[in-house]
Image: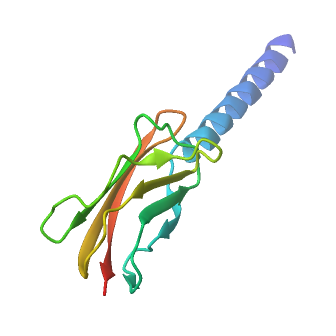
Amino acid sequence: MKTSLLNSFTARGLVAAFTLTVAQLAHAHAYPTHQAPSAGATVTTAQKDVAIDFDDGLEPAFSSITVTDAKGKPVTSGKSVVDSSNRKHMSVALNALTPGDYSVAWVAVAEDGHRTQGHYSFKVK
């Protein structure tokens, strides 16, 4: 009886540990929840920055946004910044944009160290 009870507790403990591990892995990466300008957007006003909100807090030292024009030339006027009061928000200031196509590439390193990346484009009319 003692062995059976011990095996039952061990099995339940392993199931609980596995469940917690899977839950942590599911939330271990930072993905965008909002982008401004948004992917595929055509904007008519001058953009002063590109801003992305994520579903998890970011590590500022390892997270970044780059914006390039159709020729691949960077159009940012500084380094990307993770908001110290809201570590889920990252932005980068832009130079004056002329009409054309622009590409945004982002790297997000969550506070737990997991890295995600992505890209999208927008157009200025």
Q: Tell me the residue at 35%/62% (across/down).
A: 94
Foreground of the two, 46 or 118:
46
- Percent across and percent down for residue 78 are 34, 49
Q: Quadrant of the N terminus?
A: top right
Furthest residue toward right: 1
Along the horizontal axis of the image, is 102 left or right of 27?
Answer: left
Furthest residue toward left: 71
The mark total stands at 0
- Work out whether 37 lies above or below 57: below
- Percent across and percent down for residue 11 are 72, 27
- Percent across and percent down for residue 55 are 59, 54
Q: Tell me the residue at 49%/37% (across/down).
A: 59
- Percent across and percent down for residue 104 are 32, 63
Q: Quadrant of the C terminus?
A: bottom left
Furthest residue toward top: 2
Q: Tell me the residue at 65%/44% (across/down).
A: 85
The answer to which image quadrant residue 122 occupies is bottom left
Along the horizontal axis of the image, is 73 left or right of 81?
Answer: left
- Work out whether 71 lies above or below 24: below
The answer to which image quadrant residue 15 occupies is top right
Q: Tell me the residue at 54%/35% (across/down).
A: 111
Furthest residue toward front: 96
Foreground of the two, 23 or 111:
111
The answer to which image quadrant residue 109 occupies is top left
Along the horizontal axis of the image, is 34 left or right of 4?
Answer: left
